[in-house]
Amino acid sequence: LALSALVSFTMYTGRSLAGMFNYVSLEQQTCTALDYMSRDIRLANQLTGFTTNKLVFVDANPTNQLIFEYSPDDRTLTRVKEGQTNTLLTGCDSLTFSIYQRNTITNSFDQYPTSLQASNTKVIQVSWLCSRTITGSKLNTELVQTAKIVIRNQ
């Protein structure tokens, strides 16, 4: 009886610790990804290509492109800059980009949508949901991470 109680307690403690590690890992990864995106998008010169899962910018150096792309098959968000590809997020269940104009809607903090024209874009909104598994099943899911980032150089 004591042995079964000890085994049960050990398994419960192991799952709890694994869950806490997953939350820490998710939080660290999302903060790092958002830091890279915020810095790079703010310094970019212009958005030149847009889909709901891919952004293409003219970088601060006009001869370079900056690309952020979400792959739903791989569940990853990648950043391509100066020919180098970095994976910013893994285990990403969903991610969407939205684009907006500079002008804010009266009596709100929202901006007007750009009608999918990349050249009019001043604000980029990104939202994602990432998750991790413990013993093969999804037990830890981070709530949706959402941010609006302003292109300063445009």
Image (tube, grey):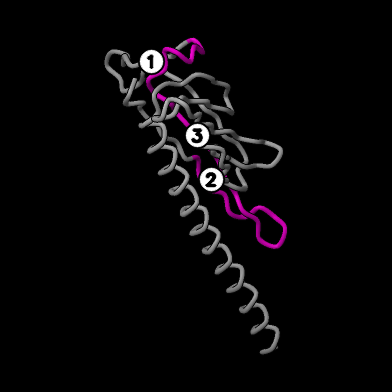
105 sits left or right of 128 in the view: left
Q: Quadrant of the N terminus?
A: bottom right
Instruction: List the residue tagged with mark 1.
Output: 101
Q: Amino acid at mark 3?
A: Ser
115 is higher (above) or lower (below) than 65? above
Q: Amino acid at mark 1?
A: Gln
Q: Residue at x 70, y 55 (%)?
A: 137
Graded by Cα atoms within 10 Å as few (under 14), some (14 to 19) or many (20 or more), the crowding at tag 2 reads many
Q: Is residue 40 magenta?
A: no
Mark 2 or mark 1: name the one nearer the start of the chain: 2
The part of the chain drawn in magenta is 115-144
Tell me where residue 114 sits by quadrant: top left
Q: Amino acid at mark 2?
A: Leu
3 is higher (above) or lower (below) than 113? below
23 sits left or right of 91 in the view: left
**Element type at marker 2?**
strand
| Residue farthest toward the bottom in the current orientation of the protein | 2
Rounded to the nearest whole Å, what is the CA distance between mark 1 and mark 3? Answer: 18 Å
Q: Residue at x 59, y 28 (%)?
A: 53
**Element type at marker 1?**
strand
Location of residue 86 in the rendering, given as x and y in whole percent from the top left corner: 56, 45
Instruction: List the residue tagged with mark 2.
Output: 88
88 is higher (above) or lower (below) than 99? below
Tell me where residue 113 sits by quadrant: top left
The answer to which of 2 and 121 lies nearer the viewer is 121
